[in-house]
Structure formats: C-alpha cells, structure tokens
Image (tube, rainbow, N blue to C red):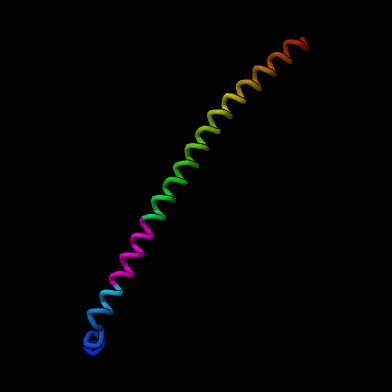
Amino acid sequence: MDQLFLEFTAEKWRKCDDHVQKNENDYCDRDMKFDAVIDSIIMNLQDDSDTSSIDENENEDDLDEVESLSE
C-alpha cells in the first residue's frame, strides 16, 4: 500500500480531484433539472385533478338535466 502512495504523484491526485469535482457539478446540475421537471409534473397533475373535478361536476349537472327531461 505504501508503494501505491509513493507512486501516486501530486499531478495524479489533482486529476482525480478535478474528475470528482466535475462529476459532483454534473450531478448537481442534473439534480436541479430533475427537480424542475418533477415539480412541473406535480403541478400538471394537480391542475388535471382540479380540471377533472370540475368536469365531473359538469357531467353530474348534465345527468341531472337528462333525468329531469325523462321524468
């Protein structure tokens, strides 16, 4: 193990550190984009559920009208 550290130069460590920092930055960028997409989906689903309940109420009103016509 000591031999490994002796052969691992400062330049190699710097490259490893640069690589890790690049990966962390890429991860953070992707995470923020992912969160934005998920938030958009959640908002869209909430909007759809509101629209759905309005549509259901309209359908119930339509059914009431049909029932009153048939009586």
In the rendered view, does 10 fall on the left or right side of 26?
left
Q: Residue at x 25, y 79 (%)?
A: 11
Please indicate whether residue 55 sits to the left or right of residue 39 in the image. Answer: right
Total numbered labels: 0
Task: Report if residue 26 lies within the magenta region.
Answer: yes
55 lies above or below 2? above
Residue 51 occupies quadrant: top right
| Highlighted range, magenta | 17-28
Query: Is residue 65 within the magenta segment?
Result: no
Locate residue 58 relative to residue 3 in the image: left or right: right
Q: Is residue 54 left or right of residue 26?
A: right
- Could you tell me which quadrant the C terminus lies in? top right
Q: In this orientation, which residue lies closer to the viewer: 23 or 67? A: 23
Give x and y (percent) for residue 47. 52, 32
Vertical placement of residue 60 versus 29, above or below: above
Q: Is residue 28 above or below residue 6?
A: above
